[in-house]
Image (cartoon, helix red, strand yellow):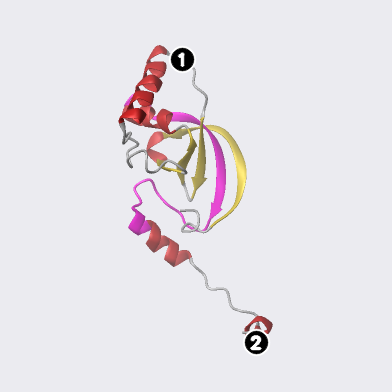
Amino acid sequence: MKRLLHTGGEHYVGIKSVPVDHIVGSEGRSRDFTRDFLPLSRSLQERWERVDAAYQDGTSLPPVRLVEIGGVYFVRDGNHRVSVARSKQERPFVDAEIVHLDSDVALNPASSLAEVRRLSAAATVMTPIAPAAASAW
């Protein structure tokens, strides 16, 4: 995804409240959760239930860690917490520690993979080859 979105430098933003519907994917666990962040296996469901119980008990949980790219967020750490928060209508925001990756592509939370590919292709700029480099071929 990083390559597709033409990401550049990474910089720390800080802790802020993020709308859960702007969290669209996972940096490393995309095979464990659906696009709506529902767990795909029973073992993940058991962990999900423990996190849900902690939320219901009022247990303070650490902020999730998110990567912001092109206006949307991907989970770096805290997939279960995001999943539980997304399932609860009364939790439209989650506290998150944000790292921003520069990108030439602007997205919105409803962007499909096909749209991301289209936007990526539109943002691609061909860099001309320097004459000296061209003559070396």
Q: Provide the residue designation for mark 1.
A: 59
Left or right position of 127 against 23: right
Residue drawn at x 41%, y 40% as measured from the top left: 22
Q: Please tell me how crowded label 2 is: few (under 14), some (14-19), or many (20+) other residues with Cα within 10 Å.
A: few
Which residue is situated farthest in the right direction here?
Answer: 132
Q: Which residues are magenta?
A: 88-115
Q: Residue placed at 61% from the left, 40% from the top?
A: 12
The C terminus sits in image quarter: bottom right
From what the image shows, is residue 76 above or below residue 121? above
N-terminal label among 2 and 1: 1
Q: Are marks 2 and 1 in contact (CB under 8 Å)?
A: no
In the image shown, does 16 or 63 lie closer to the viewer? 63
Q: Does residue 92 show up magenta in the picture? A: yes
Q: Residue under label 2, please give it.
A: 135
- Marks 2/1: CA–CA distance: 65 Å
- Please name whichever residue, 73 or 37, is drawn nearer the observer in this view of the structure: 37
Residue at screen point 32% across, 38% down: 36
> Which one is nearer the viewer's eye here, 39 or 72?
39
**Residue located 56% across and 45% down the image:** 100
